[in-house]
Amino acid sequence: MLMKDIIEKKRDKQELTEEEIRFFIDGYTNKKIPDYQASALLMAMFLNDLTPDEIAALTAAMIDSGETIDLSSIEGLKIDKHSTGGVGDKVSLIIAPIVASLGVPVAKMSGRGLGHTGGTLDKLESIPGFDINLSKEEFVDTVNKNKIALIGQTGNLVPADKMLYALRDVTGTVNSIGLIASSIMSKKLATGADGIVLDVKTGYGAFMERYEDAEKLAETMVDIGKKLGKNVTALITDMNQPLGAEVGNANEIKEVVQILKGESENELLELSKQVAVEMLLASETYKDKDAALRAVEEVLANGQAIEKLKQFVTTQKGDASFVDDYSKLPQPEHFYELKAEQDGYVNALYAQKVGKSAMLLGAGRASKEDDIDHSAGITLKKKVGAQVQSGETLAVLFSRSEIGQEAIDELKGAYVISDVKSEVPTLIKGKLSSK
């Protein structure tokens, strides 16, 4: 088999076989196929699209390119959750203790944030002492004992994806539905999940701004699950404005606690409940959606969910006393209140601009090498649909460092205030399932 023949075949819009795709992935991972040939094939895939069978074969080959995580010794169906990335999206940290307290094992591997979207690991490392570096044995033992553990991704998980993504980034082949879907699903399935609940974001602050693109990505990932024998459910959700009232790391952890304690009710709580319900259904713990929702609301109301969060933090060497004393979390030194300059209603709150402002404050990374200021972030006092008066506080920016004008201007540009009250965006815009 020759790489040149595979490139020409895809260039001519023919479907590649599983053997040809595996030859490419194996050869490139083992550095037997040079970058220039891999780039040529990626461009052919980008321009001519991938068929569902090609996408499934590519996903399977990438899974097999490195080590996989064996979770078979964990009792019950393991259901993972993945978001395509959003501003203020701390849903994973809310749903994990909820479903774990209902007996569903949460064995989750998460990543760090880059750009305007935050990473779950960065949020968790706001908690004093929290350790993401469990061994595989400790990870499995902890999930069996407590039903919950969360660690960083292992270095040799799906190496083909890391190599191909770096190449796609410099060859203009990132925005391909098939390549994006196989990248996401290969990492999720390599971690040993029996099923996955996907939160596919759409809107101004999402990777897929247009609903049609988000729907196509969701369909493609659900189809991968079906072809590879995994239960996959995808919710398509709004990311035109940030989720919840907090954007940052330590302040998002604080909001997680407030949600679990029943001290805050907003669209973040609503989405978290719906994702938790889908995980319970996928785990077959509940057969009925209404019964699953009642169970979720019960563990929130009776304190089981917040107690599970405390157990989770303590087991991973964190100081769980922050749950009742937020001063234990990293504290900012500088604050700036963004004021409304006119009367009216918040007509739009562009999530991407809010996220960029938070990144400029130090809450995110422009590059992988950047350090995080866990105390930095933004509290949103007014969101879409809210009435405001001139001089009223729209949001508060905070950081350990002086608040820069660029961050202020970016957040100011996120707000659109008009005389007409606009409708709050529909939170859940669609749902697809492999069942």
Image (tube, rainbow, N blue to C red):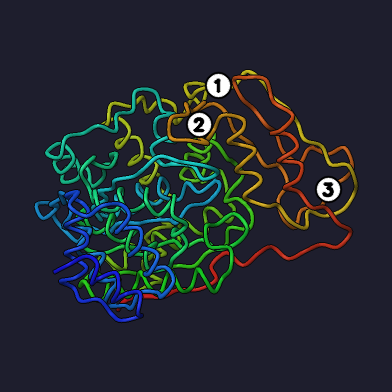
Is residue 157 among the parts visible in the rendering?
A: yes
- Determine whether the residue tagged by mark 2 lies in a helix, strand or loop: helix
Q: What residue is pinned by disc 1? A: 331
Inspect the image, locate mark 1, and give the three-letter code of the amino acid beneath it. Answer: Gln
Within 10 Å of disc 2 (Cα), the crowding (few <14, some 14-19, many 20+) is: many
Which mark sits nearer the N-terminus, 1 or 2? Answer: 2
Q: Tag on residue 388?
A: 3
Q: Are marks 1 and 2 in contact (CB under 8 Å)?
A: yes
Q: Quadrant of residue 286?
A: bottom left
| CA–CA distance in space, label 1 to label 2 | 8 Å
x, y (%) of residue 426? 61, 67
Name the residue tied to disc 2: 250
Q: Residue at x 47, y 41 (%)?
A: 114
Q: Residues within 10 Å of mark 3 (few under 14, many from 20)?
A: many
Quick one: SS at disc 3? strand
Report the front residue among 158 and 317: 158
Sequence order check: which comes first, mark 2 or mark 3?
A: 2
- Of 84 and 50, the residue lying toward us: 50
Structural crowding at the residue carrying mark 1, measured as other residues with C-alpha within 10 Å and reported as few (<14), some (14–19) or many (≥20)? some
Q: Looking at this view, name the residue that lies furthest to the left.
A: 73
Above-or-below relation of 181 to 251: below
Please report the residue visible at 33 percent of the width from the left and 78 percent of the height from the top: 51
Residue 57 lies in what quarter of the image?
A: bottom left
* Nearer to the camera, 356 or 46: 46
